[in-house]
Image: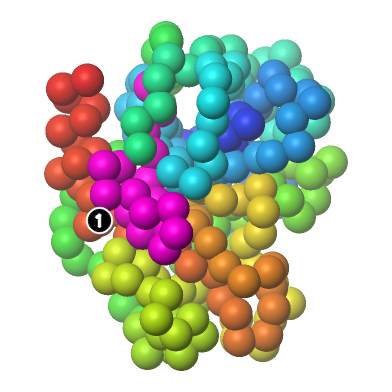
Amino acid sequence: THVSVIVAFFIHKYSASDLHLKPGPKTIHSNYRKQTLFCGGTLLSDEWVLSGAHCKPKSNVEVRLEEHDIWEPEGTGQHILSAKFIHHPDYNSLMQDSDLMLIESTCHFEQPCTPCSTSKYASDGTMCQISLSHEVPREGLQCLDTPLLSDDTCFNAYPFKITENMICSGFLEGGTDSCQGDSGGPMMCNGELQRVVSWGHGCALRNKPGVYTKVCNYICWIKDTMVSD
C-alpha cells in the first residue's frame, strides 16, 4: 500500500489498484482550515512522511489519515501532530535541487508504504500517476496519469535549470498537470514511489511540464534519517 500527504497538511493512502479510482486515494486531512497553502507528501512508515523541502512548514501541523475532502474533515481518520521537519542537507532553494523533506509524527500511523528500493528508474514514456488536490477540492483527491519525458525534453523546457536529481513529466501540449497544492506529493511509476512533485513554470502550460525530484537518488538518506533520528 502507499500513502500520500498534503503539507498544510493532509496525507492520503492508496494501493496501486486504487490509483485509477475516481475520486482518488484515501487521505490524511489537515486541521488548518484557514491555511491557503497545501503541499503533498507520502507516508513512508508508521511515523515518517516524505514531502518537498520547498513547502517549508514553520510549526507543528495536525494531519488526518483516511479523509477524502481537504476542506471538510469527515471524522473517520487518525488525527496526529507532526513532531519535526528535516530538510535534505543539500537542498538548494534557488535551484530547487534535492527538494525533499522528512516529517516525523508524534504518534504512529497505520498501513504505510515504502519507496523504491533499487536504482532502476521507469523509462521515458512510462505513464505514471500523481495525486491532485488542487483540481477538484470539493470532490476529494484525484489521480492523473502522466508520461515521463526524456532528459533532453526536460532540459529544452528549462535550460540550465535541470539537475541530475530532477525529471520532467507531463503533456507538452499543456492542459493537464500538477499544480500548486500538489507539490511534495507522490508520483507512482510501476507501482513504486519514484518521484516527488517539485516545481514548474505555471500550471499545465504548453512546453512547460512539471518537474519532479527523483526519490531513488535519496534512498540512503531517507532510510538513514528514519533509523537514526
How far from the left and from the top, in percent, is residue 185?
51, 47
Q: Which residue is mark 1?
A: 216
Residue 103 belongs to the span the image colors magenta: yes
Residue 89 as seen in the image, left or right of residue 33: left
The overriding secondary structure of the stretch rendered in magenta is loop
Circle 1 packing at 10 Å, graded few (<14), some (14-19), many (20+), is some
How far from the left and from the top, in percent, is residue 93?
44, 53
Please say if 189 is above or below 79: below
Residue 176 belongs to the span the image colors magenta: no
Residue 129 as seen in the image, left or right of residue 46: right
Find residue 28 and report its image quarter: top right
How far from the left and from the top, in percent, is residue 147?
49, 76
Q: Residue at x 49, y 73 (%)?
A: 169
Please say if 198 is above or below 23: below
Q: Residue at x 69, y 78 (%)?
A: 205
Q: Circle 1 sits in a helix, a strand or a loop, which is it?
A: helix
Q: Residue at x 34, y 49 (%)?
A: 91
Residue segment shown in magenta = 88-104
Q: Is residue 203 visible?
A: yes
The quadrant in which the N terminus is found is top left
Q: Is residue 148 visible?
A: no
Please say if 223 is above or below 169: above
Residue 113 as seen in the image, left or right of residue 131: left
The quadrant in which the C terminus is found is top left
